[in-house]
C-alpha cells in the first residue's frame, strides 16, 4: 500500500470498475498486442490483464482496417495431363514496347509476340497466331486487364472453344506461372543481342528431369548453335507419368520452402454477410467466387471479386 493505493511491485492494481477505461488508455495509440502489453507493464496490473489486452487489440475496428493479413500457404498450380492443355498469358512492357507472352503450364514453353497496340483485337490476333502453331488449349488463364475482360475476348473464347479463367483482381500471384515467365523473359531480352537466339536457347534448355520445353511440347530437341549428333534431334516419346511425378515432388519442395520462409498461416473462410474492409471501405461478403480463395464482395461502388488476402474481417461482424 502506498498513499492508500494498492500496488503490485511498481504497478498500480486497477479495480474492476476502472479496467475498461484503463484498457482504452493502454490502446489509445492503436499499437499492437506486444507494445500494449509492454506499456501496461510499466504502470498497471490486474488478473488477466494480458488476455484482455489481446482481446481489445484483436477486436479493434480501426486496427483491423490497417492490419496486414498473414501470408497464406502456397497453392501450387496443378500439373496438366498433357502439353498445351492449359496456358497462361500476360502483357508486359520492355524498352517502351509492349509484348504478349503465352506459356504452357505443362512444358513451360514460351511464346512472345511484339504488339503494335494493346487493344483486344490485337491481343486476340496474337493469340490466334500462337494457337495456329500449337493448337487451341482447353484453358487460358489471364489477369483482369480490359483486353481480356472485354466482350470481344469473350466471343473469341466461345468461337475457339476454350475456357477463359481470370486471376483475382489486384492479386497477380494467382497467375503466377505467367508472372514468373514475364520476369524470366525480361531478364533474357535485356541481356540478349539477338532476342530470337535467346528464346531458342531457353526453349532448348532442360527445365525438369533433363527435358527441355521443346521436348516436353513437341517431343524433340531443337537444333541450336551448339554442336550435337543428328540422332539427338530425332523425335522421341516423353514419359508423361514420370515427368508429372518429378514435377509434383519439385512443387512440394518449393511449397515447403515458401511456407517456411513466409511463416504462412491459413486464413479463416468468410461467409455471406460478413463485413470486411476493401480498400478501407466497409463492404459485405456476398459469397464465394469460382476461383480459389476468392470472394464476391458488395462495396459502395458495386460488387467486385477479391482474393481473401485483400479482405480484412471487421471484428464483431463474423456470422
Image (cartoon, grey):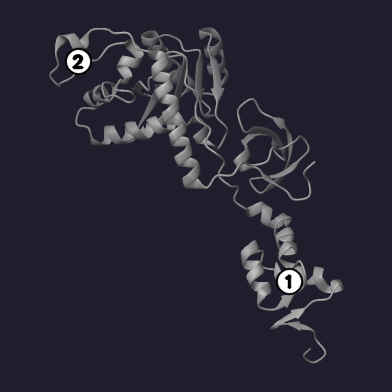
Seen in the picture, residue 216 relative to 311 is either above or below; the reply is above
Could you classify mark 2 by the number of other residues whose Cα lies within 10 Å: few (under 14), some (14-19), or many (20 or more)? some
Relative to 215, 127 lies left or right:
right
Secondary structure category for the residue under label 2: loop
Task: Compare residues 194 and 103 and report the one nearer the observer.
Answer: 103
Where, by quadrant of the figure, is residue 96 drawn?
top left
**Residue on which disc 2 sits:** 223
Residue 88, how many percent across, how many down?
46, 23
Residue farthest to the bottom, as pictured: 3
Relative to 225, 139 lies left or right:
right
Residue 105 appears in view: no
Seen in the picture, residue 295 relative to 134 is either above or below; the reply is below
Distance of mark 1 from mark 2, alpha carbons? Answer: 73 Å
Residue 20 appears in view: yes
Q: Residue at x 39, y 25 (%)?
A: 101
Relative to 171, 1 lies left or right:
right
Secondary structure category for the residue under label 1: helix
Residue 50, how many percent across, how many down?
71, 65
Residue 83, how many percent across, how many down?
41, 14
Residue 318, how many percent across, how many down?
77, 44
Could you classify mark 1 by the number of other residues whose Cα lies within 10 Å: few (under 14), some (14-19), or many (20 or more)? few
Task: Compare residues 249 and 269 and report the one nearer the observer.
Answer: 249
Seen in the picture, residue 107 relative to 58 is either above or below; the reply is above
Task: Compare residues 74 and 309 and report the one nearer the observer.
Answer: 74
How many numbered markers are drawn?
2
First of labels 1, 2 by sequence position: 1
- Residue 35 numbered mark, or none: none
**Residue on which disc 1 sits:** 25
Q: Residue at x 22, y 32 (%)?
A: 192
Amino acid at each position: 500500500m502506498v498513499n492508500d493505493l494498492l500496488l503490485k511491485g511498481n504497478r498500480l492494481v486497477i479495480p474492476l470498475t476502472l479496467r475498461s477505461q484503463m484498457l482504452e488508455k493502454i490502446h489509445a495509440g492503436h499499437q499492437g498486442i506486444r507494445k500494449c502489453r509492454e506499456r501496461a507493464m510499466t504502470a498497471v496490473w490486474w488478473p488477466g490483464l494480458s488476455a484482455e489486452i489481446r482481446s481489445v487489440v484483436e477486436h479493434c475496428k480501426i486496427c483491423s482496417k490497417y492490419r496486414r493479413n498473414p501470408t497464406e500457404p502456397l497453392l501450387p498450380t496443378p500439373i496438366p495431363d498433357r502439353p498445351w492443355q492449359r496456358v497462361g498469358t500476360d502483357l508486359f512492357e520492355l524498352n517502351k514496347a509492349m509484348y504478349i507472352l503465352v506459356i504452357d503450364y505443362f512444358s513451360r514453353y514460351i511464346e512472345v509476340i511484339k504488339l503494335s497496340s494493346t487493344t483486344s483485337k490485337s491481343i486476340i490476333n496474337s493469340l490466334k497466331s500462337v494457337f495456329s502453331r500449337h493448337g487451341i488449349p482447353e484453358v487460358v488463364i489471364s489477369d483482369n486487364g480490359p483486353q481480356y475482360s472485354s466482350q470481344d475476348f469473350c466471343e473469341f473464347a466461345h468461337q475457339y472453344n476454350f475456357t477463359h479463367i481470370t486471376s483475382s483482381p489486384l492479386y497477380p500471384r494467382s497467375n503466377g506461372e505467367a508472372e514468373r515467365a514475364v520476369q524470366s523473359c525480361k531478364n533474357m531480352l535485356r541481356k540478349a543481342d539477338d532476342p530470337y537466339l535467346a528464346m531458342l536457347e531457353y526453349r532448348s534448355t532442360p527445365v525438369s528431369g533433363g527435358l527441355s520445353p521443346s521436348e516436353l511440347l513437341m517431343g524433340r530437341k531443337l537444333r541450336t548453335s551448339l554442336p550435337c549428333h543428328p540422332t539427338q534431334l530425332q523425335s522421341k516419346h516423353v514419359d508423361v507419368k514420370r515427368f508429372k511425378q518429378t514435377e509434383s515432388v519439385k512443387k512440394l519442395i518449393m511449397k515447403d520452402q515458401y511456407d517456411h520462409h513466409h511463416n504462412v498461416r491459413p486464413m479463416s473462410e468468410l461467409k455471406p454477410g460478413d463485413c470486411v474492409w476493401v480498400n478501407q471501405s466497409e463492404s459485405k461478403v456476398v459469397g464465394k467466387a469460382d476461383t480459389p480463395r476468392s470472394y464476391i464482395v458488395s462495396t459502395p461502388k458495386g460488387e467486385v471479386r477479391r482474393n481473401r488476402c485483400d479482405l480484412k474481417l471487421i471484428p464483431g461482424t463474423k456470422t
